[in-house]
Amino acid sequence: MALKHKISVVVLAAGEGTRMKSGTPKVLHLLCGRPMVDYVLDAAAGVEPQAIVVVIGHMGEEVAGRISQGWAKTNRMSQILRFAWQREQRGTGHAVACALDQVPDCDHVMILCGDTPLITGNLLRSFFESHLSAKADVSLITAVVDDPGDYGRIRRNEKGNILGIVEANDLLPEDRHIREINAGIYVVRRNILAELVSQLDDNNAKGEFYLTDIVEKAARAGYTVSSFSCDDICLVQGVNDRYALSQAESRLRQAILRKLCLEGITIRDPGNTYIDPGVTIGRDTIIEPGTFLRGKTTIGAGCVIGPNTELIDSHIGDRSKVWFSVVERSVIGENVVIGPFAHIRPDCVIEDNVSIGNFAEVKNSRIGRGTKVHHHSYLGDSIIGSQVNIGAGTVTVNYDGHKKHMTVIEDNAFIGCNANLIAPVRIGKDSYVAAGSTITQDVPEGALGIARERQVNKEGWVARRKHKLN
Protein backbone atom coordinates (compact mmCIF):
# COMPACT_ATOMS: atom_id res chain seq x y z
CA MET A 1 0.00 0.00 0.00
CA ALA A 2 1.40 3.39 -0.98
CA LEU A 3 2.08 5.85 1.81
CA LYS A 4 -0.05 9.01 1.61
CA HIS A 5 2.47 11.43 3.06
CA LYS A 6 5.53 12.70 1.22
CA ILE A 7 8.78 11.62 2.86
CA SER A 8 12.48 11.91 2.12
CA VAL A 9 15.29 9.93 3.70
CA VAL A 10 18.69 11.12 4.90
CA VAL A 11 21.36 8.42 5.29
CA LEU A 12 24.39 9.35 7.38
CA ALA A 13 27.46 7.83 5.73
CA ALA A 14 30.23 10.38 6.25
CA GLY A 15 32.13 8.81 9.13
CA GLU A 16 35.55 7.20 8.89
CA GLY A 17 34.76 4.33 11.26
CA THR A 18 38.12 4.33 13.03
CA ARG A 19 37.31 1.18 15.00
CA MET A 20 37.14 -0.76 11.74
CA LYS A 21 40.89 -0.10 11.41
CA SER A 22 40.68 -0.13 7.64
CA GLY A 23 41.51 1.85 4.53
CA THR A 24 38.01 1.10 3.26
CA PRO A 25 35.22 3.54 4.15
CA LYS A 26 33.11 2.03 6.92
CA VAL A 27 29.84 1.89 4.98
CA LEU A 28 31.52 0.09 2.06
CA HIS A 29 32.59 -2.94 4.06
CA LEU A 30 30.95 -6.01 2.56
CA LEU A 31 28.27 -8.22 4.04
CA CYS A 32 27.35 -11.25 1.93
CA GLY A 33 29.04 -9.60 -1.04
CA ARG A 34 27.34 -6.17 -0.78
CA PRO A 35 28.42 -2.92 0.89
CA MET A 36 26.60 -2.53 4.19
CA VAL A 37 25.15 0.82 3.10
CA ASP A 38 23.29 -0.96 0.28
CA TYR A 39 21.12 -2.76 2.82
CA VAL A 40 20.25 0.55 4.46
CA LEU A 41 19.35 2.01 1.07
CA ASP A 42 17.18 -1.03 0.33
CA ALA A 43 15.29 -0.40 3.55
CA ALA A 44 15.01 3.33 2.82
CA ALA A 45 13.46 2.59 -0.56
CA GLY A 46 10.76 0.65 1.28
CA VAL A 47 9.11 3.88 2.52
CA GLU A 48 8.76 5.13 -1.07
CA PRO A 49 10.73 8.35 -0.56
CA GLN A 50 10.80 11.36 -2.86
CA ALA A 51 14.55 11.51 -2.36
CA ILE A 52 17.32 9.61 -0.60
CA VAL A 53 20.08 11.98 0.48
CA VAL A 54 23.33 10.26 1.43
CA VAL A 55 25.66 12.39 3.55
CA ILE A 56 29.27 11.66 2.57
CA GLY A 57 32.57 12.86 3.97
CA HIS A 58 35.50 10.51 4.56
CA MET A 59 36.54 9.16 1.14
CA GLY A 60 33.27 10.59 -0.12
CA GLU A 61 34.05 10.25 -3.83
CA GLU A 62 34.57 6.51 -3.42
CA VAL A 63 31.38 6.11 -1.39
CA ALA A 64 29.31 8.14 -3.86
CA GLY A 65 30.77 6.31 -6.84
CA ARG A 66 30.13 2.88 -5.37
CA ILE A 67 26.52 3.74 -4.50
CA SER A 68 25.81 5.42 -7.84
CA GLN A 69 27.32 2.68 -9.99
CA GLY A 70 26.16 -0.14 -7.75
CA TRP A 71 22.98 0.19 -5.72
CA ALA A 72 21.38 3.10 -7.63
CA LYS A 73 22.12 1.66 -11.07
CA THR A 74 21.01 -1.85 -10.17
CA ASN A 75 17.78 -0.67 -8.58
CA ARG A 76 17.13 2.17 -11.04
CA MET A 77 17.09 4.70 -8.21
CA SER A 78 19.40 7.30 -9.71
CA GLN A 79 16.52 9.74 -10.14
CA ILE A 80 15.88 9.98 -6.39
CA LEU A 81 19.46 9.61 -5.13
CA ARG A 82 21.33 12.69 -3.97
CA PHE A 83 24.59 13.33 -2.11
CA ALA A 84 25.46 15.97 0.47
CA TRP A 85 29.00 16.67 1.66
CA GLN A 86 30.03 16.92 5.30
CA ARG A 87 33.50 18.36 4.83
CA GLU A 88 34.28 18.40 8.56
CA GLN A 89 33.31 15.55 10.86
CA ARG A 90 31.47 17.52 13.54
CA GLY A 91 28.80 15.05 14.59
CA THR A 92 25.48 13.65 13.43
CA GLY A 93 23.60 16.91 13.97
CA HIS A 94 26.07 18.72 11.75
CA ALA A 95 25.72 15.96 9.14
CA VAL A 96 21.95 16.47 8.96
CA ALA A 97 22.46 20.23 8.68
CA CYS A 98 24.72 19.57 5.68
CA ALA A 99 21.95 17.50 4.06
CA LEU A 100 19.10 20.01 4.39
CA ASP A 101 19.78 21.80 1.10
CA GLN A 102 19.40 18.50 -0.75
CA VAL A 103 16.13 17.52 0.96
CA PRO A 104 13.17 18.44 -1.27
CA ASP A 105 9.90 19.98 -0.15
CA CYS A 106 8.09 17.15 1.65
CA ASP A 107 6.07 16.42 4.78
CA HIS A 108 8.57 14.33 6.76
CA VAL A 109 12.25 13.42 6.83
CA MET A 110 13.49 10.04 8.01
CA ILE A 111 17.09 9.91 9.24
CA LEU A 112 19.03 6.64 9.12
CA CYS A 113 22.59 5.55 9.86
CA GLY A 114 24.55 3.99 7.01
CA ASP A 115 26.05 1.36 9.31
CA THR A 116 22.82 -0.46 10.33
CA PRO A 117 22.62 -3.11 7.59
CA LEU A 118 20.01 -5.31 9.30
CA ILE A 119 17.31 -2.65 9.17
CA THR A 120 14.38 -3.60 6.94
CA GLY A 121 11.89 -1.75 4.81
CA ASN A 122 9.01 -3.37 6.72
CA LEU A 123 10.33 -2.05 10.02
CA LEU A 124 10.75 1.46 8.63
CA ARG A 125 7.26 1.46 7.12
CA SER A 126 5.78 0.38 10.46
CA PHE A 127 7.80 3.08 12.19
CA PHE A 128 6.59 5.76 9.79
CA GLU A 129 2.98 4.62 10.08
CA SER A 130 3.32 4.81 13.88
CA HIS A 131 4.67 8.36 13.54
CA LEU A 132 1.69 9.34 11.43
CA SER A 133 -0.82 7.65 13.72
CA ALA A 134 0.59 9.50 16.73
CA LYS A 135 0.48 12.78 14.77
CA ALA A 136 3.99 13.28 16.08
CA ASP A 137 6.42 16.02 15.21
CA VAL A 138 9.46 13.93 16.10
CA SER A 139 9.59 10.14 16.38
CA LEU A 140 12.44 7.79 17.17
CA ILE A 141 13.01 4.05 17.38
CA THR A 142 13.92 2.73 20.83
CA ALA A 143 14.68 -0.70 22.29
CA VAL A 144 15.02 -2.12 25.78
CA VAL A 145 18.23 -4.07 26.30
CA ASP A 146 20.03 -5.72 29.21
CA ASP A 147 23.33 -4.01 28.46
CA PRO A 148 22.96 -0.54 26.88
CA GLY A 149 26.70 -0.25 26.29
CA ASP A 150 27.58 2.81 24.20
CA TYR A 151 24.01 3.58 23.19
CA GLY A 152 22.28 6.78 24.19
CA ARG A 153 19.61 6.36 26.91
CA ILE A 154 16.01 7.55 26.71
CA ARG A 155 15.00 9.92 29.51
CA ARG A 156 11.29 9.92 30.38
CA ASN A 157 9.23 11.69 33.02
CA GLU A 158 6.94 9.99 35.53
CA LYS A 159 4.14 9.94 32.94
CA GLY A 160 6.34 8.13 30.45
CA ASN A 161 6.77 11.08 28.13
CA ILE A 162 10.16 11.40 26.44
CA LEU A 163 12.25 14.23 27.81
CA GLY A 164 15.38 13.64 25.74
CA ILE A 165 18.35 11.39 25.04
CA VAL A 166 21.59 11.32 26.96
CA GLU A 167 24.67 9.94 25.21
CA ALA A 168 26.74 7.27 26.97
CA ASN A 169 29.69 9.66 27.39
CA ASP A 170 27.47 12.19 29.16
CA LEU A 171 25.57 9.90 31.52
CA LEU A 172 24.76 11.18 34.99
CA PRO A 173 24.58 8.78 37.95
CA GLU A 174 20.77 8.84 37.88
CA ASP A 175 20.82 7.78 34.20
CA ARG A 176 22.83 4.60 34.61
CA HIS A 177 19.83 2.42 35.46
CA ILE A 178 18.10 3.25 32.15
CA ARG A 179 17.84 0.26 29.82
CA GLU A 180 15.85 1.88 27.01
CA ILE A 181 18.23 2.94 24.27
CA ASN A 182 18.09 5.15 21.20
CA ALA A 183 18.50 3.30 17.90
CA GLY A 184 19.55 6.45 16.02
CA ILE A 185 16.59 6.36 13.61
CA TYR A 186 14.24 9.32 13.46
CA VAL A 187 11.31 10.83 11.58
CA VAL A 188 10.92 14.61 11.85
CA ARG A 189 8.41 16.95 10.26
CA ARG A 190 10.21 18.73 7.46
CA ASN A 191 8.99 22.17 8.54
CA ILE A 192 10.64 21.95 11.99
CA LEU A 193 13.79 19.97 11.19
CA ALA A 194 15.90 23.00 10.21
CA GLU A 195 14.70 24.87 13.31
CA LEU A 196 15.70 22.03 15.65
CA VAL A 197 19.07 21.43 13.99
CA SER A 198 19.95 25.12 14.09
CA GLN A 199 19.59 25.07 17.89
CA LEU A 200 22.23 22.37 18.41
CA ASP A 201 25.51 23.14 20.19
CA ASP A 202 28.71 21.19 20.85
CA ASN A 203 28.70 21.54 24.63
CA ASN A 204 29.31 17.87 25.38
CA ALA A 205 32.08 15.37 26.10
CA LYS A 206 32.93 14.90 22.41
CA GLY A 207 32.57 18.53 21.35
CA GLU A 208 30.19 17.49 18.56
CA PHE A 209 26.74 18.51 17.41
CA TYR A 210 24.58 15.58 18.52
CA LEU A 211 21.47 14.87 16.48
CA THR A 212 20.06 13.23 19.60
CA ASP A 213 19.69 16.68 21.17
CA ILE A 214 16.82 17.55 18.82
CA VAL A 215 14.59 15.24 20.86
CA GLU A 216 15.03 17.25 24.06
CA LYS A 217 14.69 20.54 22.18
CA ALA A 218 11.48 19.33 20.53
CA ALA A 219 10.03 18.23 23.88
CA ARG A 220 10.94 21.54 25.52
CA ALA A 221 9.34 23.46 22.66
CA GLY A 222 6.07 21.58 23.15
CA TYR A 223 6.29 19.45 20.03
CA THR A 224 4.87 15.94 20.14
CA VAL A 225 7.64 13.36 20.58
CA SER A 226 6.75 9.74 19.95
CA SER A 227 8.71 6.48 20.23
CA PHE A 228 8.45 3.21 18.34
CA SER A 229 9.72 0.14 20.18
CA CYS A 230 11.80 -2.38 18.25
CA ASP A 231 11.59 -5.84 19.80
CA ASP A 232 14.64 -7.17 17.95
CA ILE A 233 17.65 -5.05 18.84
CA CYS A 234 19.74 -6.77 16.15
CA LEU A 235 17.71 -5.03 13.44
CA VAL A 236 18.88 -1.58 14.54
CA GLN A 237 22.38 -2.32 15.81
CA GLY A 238 25.22 -0.39 14.25
CA VAL A 239 28.38 -2.00 12.92
CA ASN A 240 31.33 -0.29 14.59
CA ASP A 241 34.11 -2.90 14.35
CA ARG A 242 35.08 -6.06 12.50
CA TYR A 243 33.49 -8.35 15.08
CA ALA A 244 30.15 -6.57 14.78
CA LEU A 245 30.55 -6.84 11.00
CA SER A 246 30.98 -10.60 11.25
CA GLN A 247 27.95 -10.89 13.55
CA ALA A 248 25.80 -8.88 11.14
CA GLU A 249 26.95 -10.98 8.20
CA SER A 250 26.17 -14.18 10.08
CA ARG A 251 22.63 -13.02 10.72
CA LEU A 252 22.12 -11.93 7.12
CA ARG A 253 23.53 -15.20 5.86
CA GLN A 254 21.25 -17.29 8.04
CA ALA A 255 18.22 -15.32 6.83
CA ILE A 256 19.23 -15.99 3.21
CA LEU A 257 19.73 -19.70 3.87
CA ARG A 258 16.43 -20.03 5.72
CA LYS A 259 14.56 -18.44 2.84
CA LEU A 260 16.20 -20.79 0.34
CA CYS A 261 15.42 -23.85 2.44
CA LEU A 262 11.77 -22.84 2.61
CA GLU A 263 11.77 -22.54 -1.20
CA GLY A 264 12.75 -26.20 -1.64
CA ILE A 265 16.55 -26.15 -1.60
CA THR A 266 18.55 -28.55 0.58
CA ILE A 267 21.42 -26.92 2.46
CA ARG A 268 23.39 -29.63 4.23
CA ASP A 269 25.23 -27.41 6.69
CA PRO A 270 23.94 -23.83 7.09
CA GLY A 271 26.85 -23.00 9.37
CA ASN A 272 29.32 -23.74 6.59
CA THR A 273 27.51 -22.35 3.52
CA TYR A 274 27.88 -18.81 2.17
CA ILE A 275 25.32 -17.45 -0.29
CA ASP A 276 24.97 -13.84 -1.43
CA PRO A 277 21.50 -12.25 -1.52
CA GLY A 278 21.51 -11.94 -5.33
CA VAL A 279 21.81 -15.71 -5.88
CA THR A 280 18.81 -17.69 -7.17
CA ILE A 281 18.50 -21.48 -6.88
CA GLY A 282 15.98 -23.92 -8.33
CA ARG A 283 14.04 -26.54 -6.40
CA ASP A 284 15.58 -29.82 -5.29
CA THR A 285 19.10 -28.50 -5.67
CA ILE A 286 21.48 -29.66 -2.94
CA ILE A 287 24.11 -27.30 -1.56
CA GLU A 288 26.92 -29.20 0.14
CA PRO A 289 29.13 -27.74 2.92
CA GLY A 290 31.97 -25.34 2.19
CA THR A 291 30.15 -23.76 -0.74
CA PHE A 292 30.35 -20.06 -1.68
CA LEU A 293 27.76 -18.71 -4.11
CA ARG A 294 28.55 -15.10 -4.99
CA GLY A 295 27.16 -12.17 -6.92
CA LYS A 296 24.37 -12.80 -9.44
CA THR A 297 24.86 -16.55 -9.68
CA THR A 298 21.83 -18.55 -10.82
CA ILE A 299 21.48 -22.29 -10.32
CA GLY A 300 18.85 -24.50 -11.89
CA ALA A 301 16.73 -27.27 -10.41
CA GLY A 302 18.03 -30.64 -9.28
CA CYS A 303 21.69 -29.63 -9.14
CA VAL A 304 24.37 -30.66 -6.67
CA ILE A 305 26.77 -27.88 -5.77
CA GLY A 306 29.75 -28.60 -3.54
CA PRO A 307 31.26 -29.54 -1.29
CA ASN A 308 34.00 -26.90 -1.22
CA THR A 309 32.93 -25.07 -4.36
CA GLU A 310 32.85 -21.38 -5.33
CA LEU A 311 30.56 -19.97 -8.04
CA ILE A 312 30.91 -16.30 -8.99
CA ASP A 313 28.39 -14.48 -11.23
CA SER A 314 27.71 -17.69 -13.13
CA HIS A 315 24.74 -19.68 -14.43
CA ILE A 316 24.42 -23.40 -13.76
CA GLY A 317 21.81 -25.34 -15.74
CA ASP A 318 19.39 -27.96 -14.39
CA ARG A 319 20.70 -31.27 -13.02
CA SER A 320 24.34 -30.24 -13.17
CA LYS A 321 26.98 -31.09 -10.59
CA VAL A 322 29.90 -28.88 -9.59
CA TRP A 323 32.07 -30.18 -6.76
CA PHE A 324 35.40 -29.13 -5.25
CA SER A 325 35.71 -26.54 -8.05
CA VAL A 326 35.61 -22.84 -8.97
CA VAL A 327 33.43 -21.29 -11.70
CA GLU A 328 33.80 -17.58 -12.55
CA ARG A 329 31.52 -15.46 -14.77
CA SER A 330 30.57 -18.36 -17.02
CA VAL A 331 27.48 -20.16 -18.33
CA ILE A 332 27.16 -23.87 -17.61
CA GLY A 333 24.49 -25.94 -19.36
CA GLU A 334 22.28 -28.79 -18.18
CA ASN A 335 23.52 -32.21 -17.03
CA VAL A 336 27.10 -30.98 -16.81
CA VAL A 337 29.62 -32.46 -14.39
CA ILE A 338 32.53 -30.28 -13.28
CA GLY A 339 35.21 -31.44 -10.89
CA PRO A 340 36.65 -32.30 -8.61
CA PHE A 341 39.31 -29.57 -8.54
CA ALA A 342 38.41 -27.96 -11.85
CA HIS A 343 38.65 -24.22 -12.57
CA ILE A 344 36.29 -22.57 -15.04
CA ARG A 345 37.68 -19.09 -15.54
CA PRO A 346 35.70 -16.11 -16.91
CA ASP A 347 33.86 -15.99 -20.22
CA CYS A 348 33.25 -19.67 -20.75
CA VAL A 349 30.17 -21.35 -22.17
CA ILE A 350 29.90 -25.01 -21.27
CA GLU A 351 27.05 -26.63 -23.19
CA ASP A 352 24.80 -29.50 -22.07
CA ASN A 353 26.11 -32.94 -21.08
CA VAL A 354 29.75 -31.87 -20.89
CA SER A 355 32.12 -33.51 -18.41
CA ILE A 356 35.12 -31.60 -17.10
CA GLY A 357 37.41 -33.70 -14.94
CA ASN A 358 39.76 -33.13 -12.06
CA PHE A 359 42.46 -30.47 -12.29
CA ALA A 360 41.16 -29.27 -15.66
CA GLU A 361 41.14 -25.54 -16.42
CA VAL A 362 39.06 -23.72 -19.03
CA LYS A 363 39.28 -20.02 -19.93
CA ASN A 364 37.40 -17.88 -22.47
CA SER A 365 36.18 -20.94 -24.35
CA ARG A 366 33.02 -22.57 -25.64
CA ILE A 367 32.72 -26.31 -25.19
CA GLY A 368 30.07 -28.12 -27.23
CA ARG A 369 27.46 -30.65 -26.15
CA GLY A 370 28.67 -34.01 -24.89
CA THR A 371 32.37 -33.15 -24.96
CA LYS A 372 34.65 -34.68 -22.33
CA VAL A 373 37.61 -32.75 -20.97
CA HIS A 374 39.75 -35.10 -18.96
CA HIS A 375 42.07 -34.44 -16.06
CA HIS A 376 45.05 -32.08 -16.08
CA SER A 377 43.95 -30.36 -19.30
CA TYR A 378 44.03 -26.65 -20.12
CA LEU A 379 41.74 -25.12 -22.74
CA GLY A 380 42.17 -21.38 -23.25
CA ASP A 381 40.74 -19.15 -26.01
CA SER A 382 39.16 -22.16 -27.66
CA ILE A 383 36.08 -23.22 -29.54
CA ILE A 384 35.43 -26.90 -28.96
CA GLY A 385 32.72 -28.74 -30.90
CA SER A 386 30.32 -31.40 -29.69
CA GLN A 387 31.24 -34.98 -28.74
CA VAL A 388 34.95 -34.16 -28.63
CA ASN A 389 37.36 -36.20 -26.50
CA ILE A 390 40.08 -34.12 -24.81
CA GLY A 391 42.69 -36.51 -23.48
CA ALA A 392 44.41 -36.07 -20.14
CA GLY A 393 47.18 -33.48 -20.14
CA THR A 394 46.02 -31.72 -23.32
CA VAL A 395 47.08 -28.07 -23.51
CA THR A 396 46.04 -25.33 -25.92
CA VAL A 397 49.15 -23.21 -26.18
CA ASN A 398 47.34 -19.92 -26.69
CA TYR A 399 49.86 -17.23 -25.66
CA ASP A 400 52.97 -16.33 -27.64
CA GLY A 401 54.23 -13.77 -25.13
CA HIS A 402 52.47 -10.87 -26.82
CA LYS A 403 48.93 -11.89 -27.77
CA LYS A 404 46.42 -14.71 -27.39
CA HIS A 405 45.47 -17.02 -30.25
CA MET A 406 42.45 -19.24 -30.88
CA THR A 407 42.24 -23.02 -31.08
CA VAL A 408 39.29 -24.58 -32.88
CA ILE A 409 38.45 -28.27 -32.43
CA GLU A 410 35.52 -29.42 -34.54
CA ASP A 411 32.81 -32.00 -33.77
CA ASN A 412 33.73 -35.60 -32.92
CA ALA A 413 37.47 -34.97 -32.87
CA PHE A 414 39.65 -37.13 -30.60
CA ILE A 415 42.65 -35.53 -28.88
CA GLY A 416 45.02 -38.04 -27.34
CA CYS A 417 46.76 -37.60 -23.99
CA ASN A 418 49.58 -35.08 -23.53
CA ALA A 419 48.90 -33.24 -26.77
CA ASN A 420 50.08 -29.64 -27.19
CA LEU A 421 47.96 -27.64 -29.66
CA ILE A 422 49.99 -24.60 -30.70
CA ALA A 423 47.50 -21.83 -31.53
CA PRO A 424 46.31 -20.59 -33.89
CA VAL A 425 45.34 -24.05 -35.06
CA ARG A 426 42.24 -25.94 -36.23
CA ILE A 427 41.54 -29.62 -35.64
CA GLY A 428 39.03 -30.82 -38.21
CA LYS A 429 35.80 -32.77 -37.74
CA ASP A 430 36.19 -36.51 -37.01
CA SER A 431 39.99 -36.16 -36.88
CA TYR A 432 42.46 -37.66 -34.43
CA VAL A 433 45.54 -36.24 -32.73
CA ALA A 434 47.95 -38.90 -31.55
CA ALA A 435 48.96 -38.94 -27.91
CA GLY A 436 52.13 -37.01 -27.12
CA SER A 437 51.91 -34.84 -30.26
CA THR A 438 52.79 -31.17 -30.49
CA ILE A 439 50.50 -29.89 -33.25
CA THR A 440 51.63 -26.73 -35.03
CA GLN A 441 49.57 -27.05 -38.23
CA ASP A 442 45.88 -27.64 -38.94
CA VAL A 443 44.68 -31.24 -38.95
CA PRO A 444 42.21 -31.83 -41.84
CA GLU A 445 38.80 -33.42 -41.35
CA GLY A 446 39.03 -37.17 -40.82
CA ALA A 447 42.84 -37.14 -40.63
CA LEU A 448 45.29 -38.41 -38.00
CA GLY A 449 47.78 -35.83 -36.80
CA ILE A 450 51.07 -37.17 -35.44
CA ALA A 451 53.87 -34.86 -34.36
CA ARG A 452 56.46 -36.71 -32.29
CA GLU A 453 59.94 -38.23 -32.66
CA ARG A 454 60.25 -41.83 -33.86
CA GLN A 455 61.14 -44.11 -30.95
CA VAL A 456 64.72 -45.40 -30.92
CA ASN A 457 65.87 -48.21 -28.57
CA LYS A 458 69.64 -48.34 -27.94
CA GLU A 459 70.48 -51.88 -26.89
CA GLY A 460 73.08 -52.21 -24.10
CA TRP A 461 73.11 -48.45 -23.35
CA VAL A 462 72.62 -48.85 -19.58
CA ALA A 463 75.51 -51.28 -19.14
CA ARG A 464 77.86 -49.08 -21.18
CA ARG A 465 76.91 -46.05 -19.11
CA LYS A 466 77.61 -47.88 -15.85
CA HIS A 467 81.03 -49.01 -17.18
CA LYS A 468 82.00 -45.46 -18.01
CA LEU A 469 80.97 -44.19 -14.57
CA ASN A 470 83.08 -46.84 -12.90
Image (cartoon, helix red, strand yellow):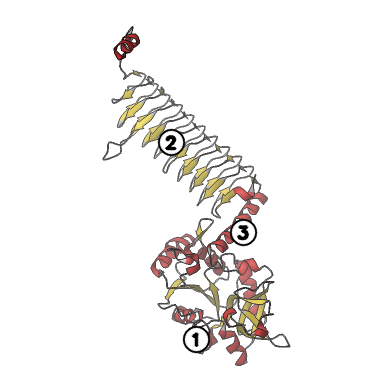
User: Badge 1 local density, few (<14 within 10 Å), some, or many (20+)?
Assistant: some
Under mark 2, the amino acid is Glu
Query: In this orientation, does residue 76 appear?
Result: no
Q: Which residue is mark 3?
A: 251
Give how far across and how far down residue 455 sits, in percent.
Answer: 33, 13
Q: Is residue 361 left or right of residue 424?
A: right
Q: Are marks 1 and 3 in contact (CB under 8 Å)?
A: no
Under mark 1, the amino acid is Asp
Query: In this orientation, does residue 426 appear?
Result: yes
Q: Secondary structure at mark 3?
A: helix
> What's the mark number on residue 361?
2
Q: Are marks 3 and 2 in contact (CB under 8 Å)?
A: no
At x 46%, y 29%, the residue is 375
Q: Secondary structure at mark 2?
A: strand
Using the image as rendered, state which of residue 113 and residue 41 is in the foreground: 113
Nearer-N-terminus badge (3/2)? 3
User: Badge 3 local density, few (<14 within 10 Å), some, or many (20+)?
Assistant: some
Give how far across and how far down residue 368 sits, in percent.
Answer: 45, 32
Q: Which residue is mark 1?
A: 202
Using the image as rendered, state which of residue 335 and residue 228 is in the foreground: 228
Is residue 413 depicted above or below 299 in this figure? Answer: above
Under mark 3, the amino acid is Arg
User: Badge 2 local density, few (<14 within 10 Å), some, or many (20+)?
Assistant: many
Q: Are marks 2 and 1 in contact (CB under 8 Å)?
A: no
Task: Give the quarter of the image for residue 288.
Answer: top right
Disc 2/disc 1 C-alpha distance (Å): 61 Å
> What's the mark number on residue 90?
none
